[in-house]
Image: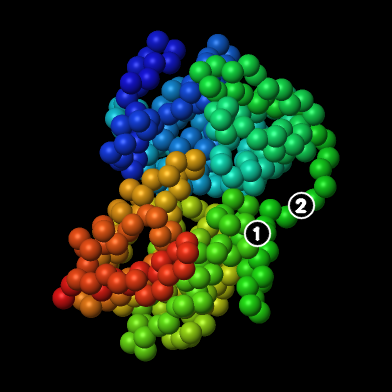
Amino acid sequence: MLEFNSQTYQLERYPKTFDKSLRAWSNAELLVLDTIADRNIETVHVFNDRFGVWNCALHDKKVTTVWTYASQQKAIRQNLELNKLAVEVDYKTPLEDLQSVELALIKIPKSIELFELFLQQIHKASHENTEVVCGFMTKYFSTSFIKVAEQYFEEVNQSKAWKKARLLVLKSPKKSLPKKEFINTISWKDKTLQQYYGVFSSGSIDIGTQFFLENLELKSDELKVLDVASGNGIIAYEVTNQNPDIEVTLIDDFNLAIESSKINLEGKKVQFVCDDTLEKLDKNSFDLVVSNPPFHFEHENNIEVALNLFRGVENCLKANGRFLLVANSHLNYSTHLNQLFASVSILKQNKKFQIIECIKKR
């Protein structure tokens, strides 16, 4: 339960977790709320409101929510409904233009690049009185927070700590900025991939995915393929290179990952889905599922998200269909996969990673 401005709110995490130490809000978000509690504001823009604490507590304001994850939208709706509040939310992506920004609230994300993309979006819609209040837990502090903020604002002030949380308060937007592209380019074989700021592994193809691609061999009858947690689309790209007749569906929770993969797979026979589960996909419909599944949730290590995806994979694979994934060896996914699939075997491994093959029961 959370109290703010003499009101009590019930907040739950989505997706649900069995880890009782994890809450649906942080002290950083509470410190931001406490800082603006007495202000007479009508409109506010919120960024990285992961579970909807700001949408709930500021429900009497005109709130614009910049969303990045499909699961974030579900969490916000869940908690608005839980508190019997209106569920209509004015959503924008980080790539859309905003109306004039008076006050913006940011829970600083793990990705410094994503933080900069947020600031750039705010700056484009700023005026001389625009203020940005950024919250973070002190254990995650980086001087990069300040360096990035100083590129966009003249005044960057850090607050004192409160319950291991701090604020950066940004004022006086700079009047002119050099033009900058918020897309990284990555070389892969003879291809140059592009991905927006904030998408996983910004400077290169991560080593787990490289290991997976070096050992990826498709079967001739695997013509309908699903790429789960597809990121910038590199695995789907390699799949279509092996067989141009393959139809690939890419699914990722992160909207900027999906937008990046649209750039990289232009002209291919592909479909894109921004979602955190596979529930909307047809059952028993894919010959092959490929994945480098996530186990990081911002600063948290949490395999529950991956385990939920594995259950979805089993549901949408055809009988005798294959699930190929790469994973850090220490995660011991095989124990969980053996409960879902007819056979589970390690095809390749090195000191850090395993490529696991799962076959669906008939």
Few, some or many residues within 10 Å of mark 1 (<14, 14–19, 20+): few
Of circles 2 and 1, the one toward us is 1
The residue positioned 65% from the left and 59% from the top of the image is 203
Residue at the spot of label 1: 203
Q: Amino acid at mark 1?
A: Gly
**In this orientation, which residue lies closer to the viewer: 319 or 73?**
319
Residue 227 screen position, x and y as percent: 41, 68
The residue positioned 52% from the left and 82% from the top of the image is 241
Residue 108 screen position, x and y as percent: 58, 35
Rendered image quadrant of residue 12: top left
The residue positioned 61% from the left and 29% from the top of the image is 134
* Drawn side of residue 229 relative to residue 103, left or right: left
* Drawn side of residue 311 relative to residue 190, left or right: left
Which label's residue is closer to the chain start, 2 or 1? 2
Residue at disc 2, secondary structure: loop
Give the colouring mode of the picture.
Answer: rainbow
Few, some or many residues within 10 Å of mark 2 (<14, 14–19, 20+): few
The image shows residue 252, relative to residue 139, as above or below, that is below
| Dot label at residue 180 | 2
* Drawn side of residue 124 relative to residue 339, left or right: right
The residue positioned 34% from the left and 40% from the top of the image is 14
Rendered image quadrant of residue 144: top right
| Dot label at residue 25 | none
The image shows residue 336, relative to residue 319, as above or below, that is above
